[in-house]
Amino acid sequence: MTGPRGVAIDRVFGLGRATGREVQRAILVASAASVPDAVPAGAFVVDPERAQRCIDDLGRIIDDLRLGLLPLQGSLLVPPSEDEVSRNVARNAALMGRRAETYVAAWLGQLEQTRDALSRQLAAYRAADEANAGRRG
């Protein structure tokens, strides 16, 4: 089994040579262990500001997709002529438009669900963080 150059083949068992990010992570974990009140190795850390920026960015993407979806909804393509080729082009273009509308609407729904889930998770994280801060001090 091979991997791209400079990347460990198996991160779990450590096969392959440690490079760049693996070395940096090992250094950070080793240095964090010697700092009082440091986050222990392997712990999950959330940066609420970055998470909120991600949620805001998803909101902007959702708004842009909604605007892009408007021209697709109910669009009608009239064949430029009455010949069979023109009618076929119009039919196929209408079919592609409906499929694109369905695809974009489904994608929009997934992005909205992701944004809402991230918002709930961030709110839960902040509530737990405040509760833990209250217990500590």
Image (cartoon, helix red, strand yellow):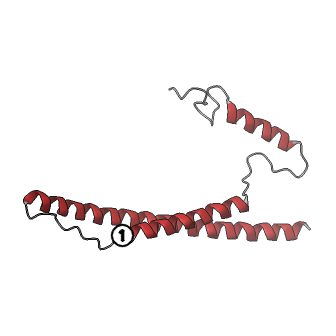
Q: Which residue lies furthest to the left in this view?
A: 83
Q: Which residue lies furthest to the bottom in this view?
A: 74
- Residue 54 position, x and y percent, is 62, 60
Q: Between 70 and 105, which is closer to the camera in this rendering?
A: 70
- Residue 115 position, x and y percent, is 56, 66
SS under mark 1: loop
Q: Which residue is drawn at 84% across and 40% down?
A: 31
Q: Between 82 and 102, which is closer to the camera in this rendering?
A: 82
Taking the image as shown, residue 130 lies to the left or right of residue 46, namely: right
Which quarter of the rendered picture does the C terminus lie within?
Answer: bottom right
Question: Which image quadrant for residue 57?
Answer: bottom right
Q: How crowded is mark 1: few (under 14 residues within 10 Å), some or many (20 or more)?
A: few
Q: Between 88 and 31, which is closer to the camera in this rendering?
A: 88
Q: Which residue is drawn at 73% across and 47% down?
A: 42
Q: Which amino acid does label 1 sit on?
A: Pro
Taking the image as shown, residue 53 lies to the left or right of residue 78, namely: right
Q: Residue at x 57, y 30 (%)?
A: 9
Taking the image as shown, residue 6 lies to the left or right of residue 133, namely: left
- Residue 76 position, x and y percent, is 24, 70
Taking the image as shown, residue 87 lies to the left or right of residue 18, namely: left
Q: Residue at x 39, y 72 (%)?
A: 70
Q: Between 34 and 52, which is closer to the camera in this rendering?
A: 52
- Residue 72 position, x and y percent, is 34, 68
Q: Mark 1 points at which residue?
A: 71
